[in-house]
Image (spheres, rainbow, N blue to C red):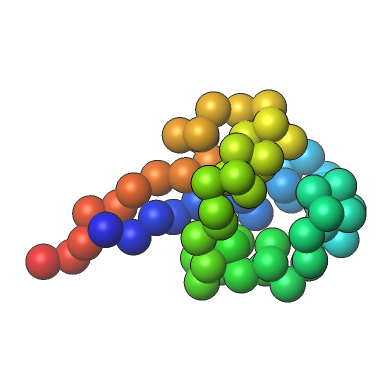
């Protein structure tokens, strides 16, 4: 089951750039791009940092999608 996220939606709605978010979280902009494009799932530690960063619940950011049959 793939994990999808709403990080880009939340980030852009708040007017936060990828560069600013990368600096705040001490990760690379490329990592943010990969996560936003669902090419990379963040570690549990980074997922929890994202929850704290946006001050939302984990299910507001991440969703487990059922695989197409």
Q: Quadrant of residue 51?
A: top right
Image mark count: 0
Percent across and percent down for residue 45 are 60, 45
- When asked about the image quadrant of residue 17, the answer is bottom right
Residue occupying the point 30% across, 52% down = 65
Q: Position of residue 4 (x, y in %)?
A: 44, 55
Residue extending furthest left? 69
Lateral position of residue 25 relative to residue 67, left or right: right
Vertical relation: 65 (above or below) 10: below
**Apparent side of residue 64 relative to residue 5 in the rendered image (left or right):** left
Identified at 87% across, 61% down, the residue is: 19
Using the image, determine if residue 55 lies above or below residue 14.
above
Residue located 83% across and 54% down the image:
26
Residue found 50% across the figure and 51% down from its top: 5
Instruction: Note whether residue 26 is visible.
Output: yes
The quadrant of the image that shows the N terminus is bottom left
Q: Quadrant of the rendered structure where residue 18 is? A: bottom right
Vertical position of residue 69 compared to residue 58: above or below: below
Which corner quadrant holds the C terminus? bottom left
* Lateral position of residue 52 relative to residue 1, left or right: right
Q: Nearer the viewer, residue 57 or 28?
A: 28
**Is 13 on the left or on the right of 35, as rendered?**
right
Q: Is residue 17 visible?
A: no
x, y (%) of residue 13? 72, 42
Where is residue 10 shown, x and y percent of the image? 66, 43
């Amino acid at each position: 089951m793939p994990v999808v996220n709403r990080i880009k939606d939340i980030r852009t709605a708040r007017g936060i750039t990828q560069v600013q978010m990368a600096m705040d979280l001490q990760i690379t902009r490329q990592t943010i791009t990969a996560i936003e494009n669902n090419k990379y799932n963040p570690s549990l530690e980074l997922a929890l940092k994202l929850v704290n960063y946006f001050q939302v619940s984990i299910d507001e950011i991440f969703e487990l999608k059922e695989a197409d049959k």
